[in-house]
Amino acid sequence: MKKSFATTAIIALTLSALGLFMAQPQPVGGQTAERPGAKQVVDVHELMDLLIDPIYEELKDAVEVAPEGRKAWRSLYISSHRLAEVNNLLFSREDDEYTTNKDWLTLSAEARDTTATLAASVKERSEYGPIKANFLNVVQSCNACHERFSEDEPPVIEPPTAWNPAAE
């Protein structure tokens, strides 16, 4: 009987300790032997060309008119959240000296934050006015970064052609 109780107690303590260990929060983005860190696959320009620009164009199409119906909301939801998440990749760029510049980090954070705000307003199914305003903040955020870091003529990110930002 004592052996059974002792064995049960050891198993319970082991499982308890294991549960406490497993419950500890794991570092996000931190590199450990168990959790490798992010690895850059493409440079900043390719990241823009291959991922960010196409998602932005999908988002621009989705936000051009007030979403009506499940399909329109879904399209806007997917593209706004994809762009918000992909903007996190800006922090993992290490291919140019400007990517370690304080301005790069500040403008990358602004791009992430404005797209996350837009995504949140879409998720809440806000009125179209705030969604549209949040999208225009994304446009301004992108253009501020392009103006600061473009080597040549900065690419200008435009809102949907049906909009007239000057009339806002």
Image (spheres, rainbow, N blue to C red):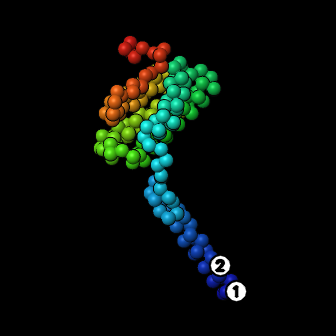
In the image, 40 versus 32, the foreground residue is 40
- Residue 9 drawn at (x, y percent): 61, 79
73 to the left or right of 97: right
Disc 2 residue type (three-letter)? Thr
Crowding at mark 1 (Cα within 10 Å: few <14, some 14-19, many 20+):
few
Q: Residue furthest left?
A: 102
Mark 1 touches mark 2? (CB < 8 Å): no
Q: Residue at x 48, y 19 (%)?
A: 160
Q: Residue furthest front?
A: 152
In the image, 59 versus 53, the foreground residue is 53
Q: Is residue 125 visible?
A: no
- Residue 166 drawn at (x, y percent): 37, 14
Eyeballing the image, is 88 above or below 61?
below
Question: Residue 8: which disc?
Answer: 2
Q: Residue at x 56, y 22 (%)?
A: 67
Q: Residue at x 54, y 71 (%)?
A: 17
Question: Residue 134: which disc?
Answer: none
68 to the left or right of 38: right
> Which quarter of the picture shows residue 147?
top left
- Residue 135 drawn at (x, y percent): 44, 26
Secondary structure under the numbered disc 1 in the rendered image = loop
Q: Mark 1, mark 2: which one is toward the viewer?
A: 2
Secondary structure under the numbered disc 2 in the rendered image = helix
Disc 1 residue type (three-letter)? Met
Q: Quadrant of the N terminus?
A: bottom right
Q: Earlier in the sequence, mark 1 or mark 2?
A: 1
Eyeballing the image, is 20 above or below 92?
below
Disc 1: which residue: 1
Eyeballing the image, is 144 above or below 65?
below
- Marks 1 and 2 sit apart, C-alpha to C-alpha, by 11 Å
